[in-house]
Amino acid sequence: DHKESYAAWLQYKKIEDFSLLENYQKWFENLASLADSVVIESAKKELLLGLSSMLGVQPTFSTERKAAAGIVLGTSVSIANQIEIDFEQLNDDGYVIKTVTTEEKSTIFLLGKEDTGVLYAAFHLLRLMQNRESMDHLDILENPKNQLRMINHWDNMDGSIERGYAGNSIFYSGNKFNDELNRIEDYARLLSSVGINGVSINNVNVHKVETDLITSSLLPKVAEVAAIFRAYGIKTFLSVNYASTIEIGNLETADPLDTGVQEWWKNKAKEIYRYIPDFGGFIVKADSEHRPGPFTYNRNHADGANMLATALEPFGGLVVWRCFVYNCLQDWRDRSTDRARAAYDHFKPLDGQFHPNVILQIKNGPMDFQVREAVSPLFGAMEQTNQMMEFQITQEYTGQQRHLCYLVPQWKEILDFDTFAKGEGSPVKNIVDGSLFQSRHSGIAAVSNIGNDYNWTGHTLAQANLYGFGRLTWNPDLSSETITNEWTLQTFGKDELVVQQVSQMLLDSWRIYENYTSPLGVGWMVNPSHHYGPNVDGYEYSVWGTYHFADYQGIGVDRTVKAGTGYTAQYFKENADRYEALETCPDELLLFFHHVPYTHRLKSGETVIQHIYNTHFEGVQQAEELTERWTLLEGKIDQERYEDILKRLQEQANHSKEWRDIINTYFYRKSGINDEKYRTIY
Ligand code: GCU
């Protein structure tokens, strides 16, 4: 049951086109594997699964080239001189797919520098077949642009998932690891197929039970999970409790400069690596939202991170230290404190002080995964420090997988954002891929959107966000359209109308969501704590530093140097100037940077208030149209997924009206300004 939903983009549907089938089949009489390892085993297993299912063939396996036509898997070491390939062109996870036809033999080589490359090549070949591309003249060379391509789980051991919208954890329930770990293998396949190579398996908020994950009581289980991921080229990481020395170590302190604390972590690292020799390292949320950290001992983040890094260093482990640090007990009356400034203010002065195996993980924006916010000014601001990106695939503020909101276009915008860190042409993607500053470690991480729902992601179309994240992280230069088309084709099959409609629905969806929710970069107009649904003042008088300052005259946060919090100065000059001046600040971020009267005229020509009304009416209409666009596909998609998705789209259309009316009514009552078109506002 739920076969299609569960298989996500690895459908491997039988190929019906006879001539294509015949053409493909000829390649798969024999599969020769010149290398052998658990990772190569996974490649073979996946090929076997895909081939038997798509082509109905069962190739024979051998350890050398055999049949007249066949596939050869190998690595730089094992391939010797059977084919001329310059392996120097490949990085550690890179691969080549090449069709070589001579008089005696026709071969498709799947060659990696290492075993993982072979696995990625196998997935790539299967993807080509799913997309019905010819294999007769393949000549592909792929290198992932980012070194670390990582998923962060916010799973708790009681089975709940913080900000999870697709059921419970696939790892845990009842404060234990699940007995049944099968599903993790299917998950690993999905991740590996899009090039993910790291996964942290527990929430960054490390509560009591999870603190024990690094003890001998749970490490054997962690090791079992790590073995499943290892076979798919994925390293396992754990989120750790900064105060572990106190919680489980019988020490009285977690002071990073205390030798007892340092010793404890060194021994702990040794112990962990006994269980998991290729353990990835620690994710740390410290001094953030009431989590413990070095501040308690008057030490800074570098002291804390370096202490852990020293312990992991002998084993090649990494410390991923999060920069989500801000005052979460603010007084709403205090206008001088600006949460957006916090990460930069805390971390920028520490540039150059972090050990080489520490990476700072920075959320894409300075606030918290809003529908739209500015790009964090910390990117590029620390030339001598490893930095990586943190995105959120789980749709906390973007409809919680009940609304369609495809995030690839948002992520692309952020990755393409020019920081000017080294002058023009210093986009974020070149900072997080390590190339701009030649960083030792770098990459992109994102918070997972999957759970134990039969379709993994609640909203079946939200599978596209996981797929897109992986593909984009592998290569940030892929266009949204390419990624979206690929995903749709693999997920729903090759049907012109389906591909065209679904792709376009996805590509339009972020803008639509933005239209009926938060105008002009303002953010935070949501119900407190669970963050679903509209509530304009939900966070206005709270401690969280999340304000829009709407009154009867105007709205927005003044973050200028001239009259506001001075946040704009955290950017390099070109961006600082652009955001500082009302005339040059882009409309979509206007209220993020400026407080303006409702009558302020945007570059679009509309006033702010009219923009709010217009976008909210338009957004609802667009949400309704999404439903109609979907119904065009009835009969072209299996009934289960068709109806599932239809239900979600209908809920979205309905709920968008709630958003429209609450937002419009609020601002109409505050401002007293009529809608120029006199539509219904309550
Ligand atoms: C957000 C989110 C929390 C999460 C935090 C974090 O505030 O709502 O659930 O713990 O981010 O990233 O640490």
Image: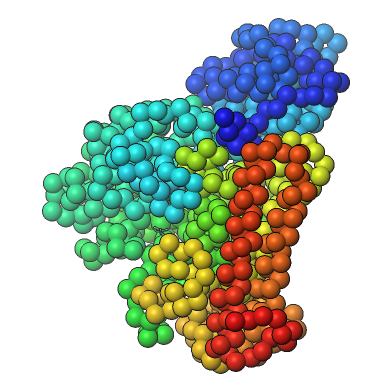
The foreground one among 276 and 77 is: 276
At 38% across and 72% down in the image, what residue appears? 544
Q: Position of residue 648 (x, y in %)?
A: 60, 52
Q: Position of residue 178 (x, y in %)?
A: 36, 33
At 58% across and 70% down in the image, what residue appears? 659
Report if residue 31 is visible in the image: yes
Q: Quadrant of the N terminus?
A: top right
Report if residue 75 is visible in the image: no
Measured along the vertical axis of the image, is residue 52 above or below residue 509?
above
Residue 166 located left or right of residue 21 = left
At 76% across and 39% down in the image, what residue appears? 636
Residue 369 located left or right of residue 209 = right
Q: Quadrant of the C terminus?
A: bottom right
The foreground one among 59 and 337 is: 59
Q: Position of residue 236 (x, y in %)?
A: 42, 37
Report ligand 1 position as a quadrant.
bottom left
Q: Quadrant of residue 214?
A: top left
Measured along the vertical axis of the image, is residue 446 above or below residue 582?
above
At 37% across and 76% down in the image, what residue appears? 542
Residue 387 located left or right of residue 81 = left
Measured along the vertical axis of the image, is residue 356 above or below residue 396?
above
Residue 115 located left or right of residue 500 = left
The foreground one among 384 and 561 is: 561
The foreground one among 193 and 574 is: 193
Q: Position of residue 628 (x, y in %)?
A: 74, 55
> Which colour style is shown?
rainbow
Count how many numbered circles sit on residues in the image. 0
